[in-house]
Amino acid sequence: MTAAETAFLELLRKGLEGREPDHRLFGELAEPDWESIYGMAKRQTVCGVCYGSFCRLPDPLLPGGSLLPRWVARVNAIETRNAGMQRALSELISMFRQAGLHPVVQKGLSVARFYGNPELRESGDIDLWLPGDELRRGTAIVSELDSTPVRHPDGSISFSYKDFVVEFHRTLVNISNPVVALRLDAYARRQCVAGGYGREAIPSPAPLLEMLLLDVHIMRHAFGNGVGLRQVCDYVLAARALDGKYDRREFGHWCHVLGISRWTALLNEYAVTLLDADPAALPPPGREAKGRLPVGKLHDIITQGGNFGQHLKGRASRPGRSRGSKLRTLAMFARRSRFAAAVAPAEAFWNFVRLMAGQIH
C-alpha cells in the first residue's frame, strides 16, 4: 500500500469516527500524493467524509497549491446538493402522505442520519419504496406532475422532481431469488404496518430491514457494475448506530434463508480490515462460513471501479438504462461470476437469470 493510500484510508476512518488523524502519516506527503488522495476520495464519493478529518490536520500538514480550494469547493457543492435534495424529499413525503401512502426512504437519505455530519455524505438519487398497491397509486400521483415516469424492466419507476432523479422501488430489499423474495417482501410489508412507518420526518426501514437492505445492495453492485467505499461506510455506520435495536438471531436467520451468509461474513471481514469496524457491532451472517473468502477480490472491485463502477476504463460517467448499459452489466456479472458463486451461489444464479430476462425485454 502506498503512502497516499494509507493516508487516504486514515482520513476516511477518522472522518467516520469524528477524530483527528495520525499526523505521522501526512508529514512526508508531496503534492502528487495529495492529488492521488483527492482522486481516491472522488472515485469513492467520500470527499465530504474525508474532509471532516482533513480539517483536523494542522496547517503545516495541509497540501499547498490549488488542491485545498478545490476540495473546499467540492464540499460546498455536496452540502448545497444535499440541502436541495432534503427539501425535495420533504415535499414528496408530504405529498404522498396526504394521499394516504406510506413511503419509505431507502439507502442514501436514510443512512445519512448515521453520519456525524449528514450533510457531508454524498448522495445520488432519491430512492423510495411504496409497499404493495401503493406503487401504482404513487405512480398515478407522479403522472400529474411535470415529469413523465419511466418504467424499467426490474419493475422500478423513475422520474425527475426539482432536478433530482427519484426512483420508486418495487421491493424494499432487492433479492433475485423469486421464492425467498416473496417471503421477504411479505415480511417487509408486515413490518411496515407494525412498525408505524411514516411517522418520522424521513421514514426509514425498520433496523433489521435497513441492515439487510444495505448488505444486499452492496452485494448486488459488487456482482455487477461495481460498488464503492461510500456504501461500505453506510453499512459500518448503520451497524454501529442500530446495534442492539434489532434481533441479531433473526438477522442471521434471514441471511441463511436468502443464501447470503458467506457474503455477509466477507463484507464484515472487509469492513473490519479496511475501516476498523467493530466486529461485535456488525450483523451476524447466520452461520459460520467455511473456506477462504475472496477478500482481495472484493477489494479489487471497490478500488478499481469506485462508486458503482463509474471509473472503470471505458465506462460512461453515469450508469444508464439503455440496452448498451444492460449489456455492460451482464458482461461485468459474467466476469465476476466465480466471485458471486463463491459468496452467494443461489443469488448469483437467479441474478444471472434476471439479467438474461432483461436482455429479452
Image (cartoon, rainbow, N blue to C red):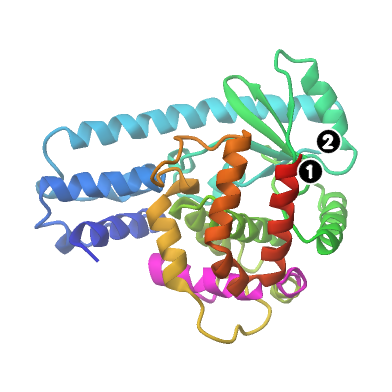
Per the image, label 1 sits on a secondary structure element best described as loop
- Magenta stretch: helix, strand or loop mostly: helix
Front-most of residues 347 and 313 = 313
Q: Is residue 277 visible in this depiction of the protein?
A: no
Left or right: where 303 falls relative to 220: left
**Disc 2 residue type (three-letter):** Leu
The residue singled out by tag 1 in the image is: 170
**Disc 1 residue type (three-letter):** Arg
Q: Quadrant of residue 345?
A: bottom right
Magenta stretch encompasses residue 271? yes
Left or right: where 256 falls relative to 178: left
Q: Quadrant of residue 29?
A: bottom left
Q: Residue furthest front?
A: 360
Contact (Cβ within 8 Å) of mark 1 with mark 2: yes
Q: Is residue 140 visible in this depiction of the protein?
A: yes
Residue drawn 73% across the image and 52% down it: 354
The residue singled out by tag 2 in the image is: 135
Q: Which residues are magenta?
A: 254-280
Compare marks 1 and 2 and give the one earlier in the sequence: 2
Residue drawn 70% across the image and 43% down it: 359
Residue 256 in the image: x percent, y percent?
73, 75
Residue drawn 84% across the image and 23% down it: 140
Magenta stretch encompasses residue 111? no
